[in-house]
Image (spheres, helix red, strand yellow):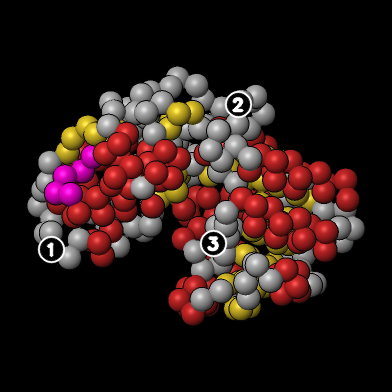
Amino acid sequence: MENLMKITVFGAGGFLGSAITRHLADKGHAVSGFVRSDSAAARARAAGAEVVRGDLADIASTVAAVDGAQAVVFAAQLLMEPERTAVRALLDSLAGTGAVFLFTSGTGVLSQRTDGDWSEDTFAEADQFTPSKYIGARVDTENEVLGFADRGVRTAIVRPGMIWGHGGCPMIREFYRGAIERGFVGYLGAGLNLYSNVHVDDVASLYGMIVDDDQASGIYHAVSGETSYRTLARAVADDIGVPCQSIDLSQAIDIWGKTTAIIYFSVCSRARAHRSRTELGWQPDATRLDILTDIGHREYRTVLPRVESTR
């Protein structure tokens, strides 16, 4: 019988956080969801959490939210410096308690700028890599988290790839948004670059396995498939009946903004989940391996008020 825990999830109303919350609550854990907005509170509550309202910029309320928690999942989305400040405060408060702390990073830390070209490089958890120029500083936060293993906290890092499912993939949403604003779906350069991808429910199951396994610690990747941006763009274009074309970086920045264009659409980020599979026995659901099945989901259509599907 599994050891049921009191767990606090930060970002429990988000796309990933709500999936993690639902998975843990369904397993019988008592989950508190730390959220800031009314809409996030509603999503966290629907996922099975007892809602705790607060703001991660308020360190006192952030730390108070983990009082008595046996496990903490940090799945909130913040800029890197505020993120590191909040994470450090949480870890300091948990030192010596034997609690579990799971930090959500991402395979973006190992991404390579290719401007649409393919990279044959792919990285497992223990492989050496040059951290991304743009978000590689998150590796410093990862290392700080892992260092608390010597201070009485069982720590783990989860690096998901491109997360999709239930119409929630941010990159796919950007293809739809760009289509309605520009009349076509664009991909950068050759469009052969990609993020290794994974269904959100399979990521949530990995968190559950780490929480339940009292030996699980260190870095774990969550990836299960690979589909190029050009293939995704063409699928979106076919879905809504608009052209699909290659664009240059200046056009990409004009459509998506500089940060999104560079961090998401100009890089190749390929990863393998070796430790997750061999040490934990993580196995993505066989029915959730094809990201193209997410194309056409009604959630993406919220940005398409004037376009009808061609399907």
- Residue wearing tag 3: 17
- Residue wearing tag 1: 306
Separation of marks 2 and 3 at Cα, in angstroms: 28 Å
Sort mark 2 into few (<14), some (14-19) or many (20+) by Cα contacts within 10 Å. few
Residue span colored magenta: 182-186
Q: Nearer the viewer, residue 230 or 59?
A: 59
Q: Nearer the viewer, residue 36 or 308?
A: 36
**Can you tell which of label 1 and label 3 is closer to the viewer?**
1
**Is residue 110 highlighted in magenta?**
no
Name the amino acid, label 2.
Thr
- Residue wearing tag 2: 130
Q: Residue lying at the far top in this picture: please name it.
A: 120
Q: Under tag 2, what secondary structure? A: loop
Which mark sits nearer the N-terminus, 1 or 2? 2
Pinpoint residue 155: horizontal percent, then vertical percent: 75, 49
Any mark on residue 185, and which? none
Query: Is residue 11 in view from this perspective?
Result: yes
Q: Nearer the viewer, residue 99 or 181?
A: 181
Separation of marks 1 and 2 at Cα, in angstroms: 44 Å
Sort mark 1 into few (<14), some (14-19) or many (20+) by Cα contacts within 10 Å. few
Picture residue at 79% right of the left edge, 72% below the top? 67
Separation of marks 1 and 3 at Cα, in angstroms: 31 Å
User: Which quadrant holds the N terminus?
Assistant: bottom right
Question: In this rendering, is residue 58 above or below 271?
Answer: below
Name the amino acid, label 1.
Arg
Pinpoint residue 17: horizontal percent, then vertical percent: 54, 62
Pinpoint residue 298: horizontal percent, then vertical percent: 26, 62
Which mark sits nearer the N-terminus, 1 or 3? 3
Picture residue at 86% right of the left edge, 58% below the top? 95
**Can you tell which of label 2 and label 3 is closer to the viewer?**
2
